Amino acid sequence: MELWYETSPMAIDTSGNGVFSEGRAKLSARTLRTDKWWIQPAITVFVLFSFIVYATFRAFENGKYFAEPLISPFYSPCLSTACVKGSPSFVGTIFGTYHIFGMTVSPSLFILIFPLAFRMTCYYYRKAYYRSFWMSPPACAVAEPHAKYTGETRAPLIIQNGHRYAFYAGLVFNVFLTIDAIGAFRNEKGQWGHMSVGTLVLLANATFLWLYSMSCHTCRHTVGGRLRNFSKHPIRYKLWTWVSILNHKHQNFAWISLFGVALADLYVRQVSGHSIRNLYFF
């Protein structure tokens, strides 16, 4: 553990900036904090890595994602002709069936790239994985081990500037998942006017995703940014105040929606695989 606190020669900054630059106190320790500051970034690594592993497994499993009237958020809308018969597509099966090394390409791979891009470029998630995976920096008053930081002005991090477009794409998929939740008010025979545990699961997932999207910093800027006079734009100002309230909870919605989409997929998988029954209230 002693090596963890030693100052790396590569971390010395002679440009006149940084915690190890000339003119700063010559401390050999990486930090003087004595609390367990590493717990939070460690938990973040564990949770995000676990989600990545699970999502990757489900994407390549290519099965157990539809059980009338429920469809997994990882596979909706199902755009490939390789989709399970009866699974909703809304816009049609615009992609054919593709094979790599003799295996059918999972339909979810045509979908997950968009919500993944939204989360990967999200302002909060950037902070989370920059600090936890890259230790840049891992915690307050803890020096990062990197020799320099060029920010998001060069490749590959310059692609983070495309977050607004990923946000717009995410809104489209939120609409699809909301339609899925409404469609869950059917029974296994496709008859309307029924509610099950699966209905609540998909409703909760869609709600959490909308709250995550609406609390996004880009959403706040979209509805109220670049206005010189709020009084001349009362509707946009009102929307901006509402989004600003949600924005304070953006971190919470980011985590809740992440767990929500994984649990929704897991529930549909269990029902589709006949491990559990989708219980109906009426």
Image (tube, grey):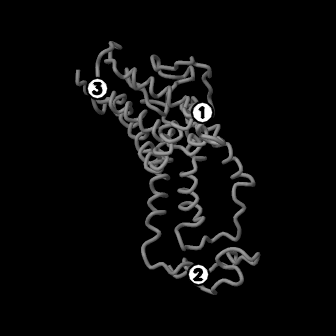
Mark 1: amino acid: Ala
Residue highlighted by disc 3: 196
Query: Does 143 sit above or below residue 44?
Result: below
Q: Residue at x 42, y 30 (%)?
A: 64
Neighbour tally class for label 1: few under 14, some 14-19, many 20 plus, Cα within 10 Å: some
Q: Earlier in the sequence, mark 2 or mark 1?
A: 2
Secondary structure of residue under mark 1: helix
Disc 2 versus disc 1: nearer the observer:
1
From this view, report whether residue 141 is shown above or below residue 175. Answer: below
Q: Amino acid at mark 3?
A: Ser
Query: Which residue position holds label 2?
Result: 6
Q: Quadrant of the C terminus?
A: top left
Q: Is residue 207 above or below residue 66?
A: below
Q: Position of residue 5 (x, y in %)?
A: 55, 79
Please, what is the three-letter code of the amino acid marked with disc 2?
Glu
Residue closer to the observer: 191 or 61: 191
The quarter of the picture where residue 162 lies is top right
- Among the 4 quarters of the image, the one containing residue 261: top left
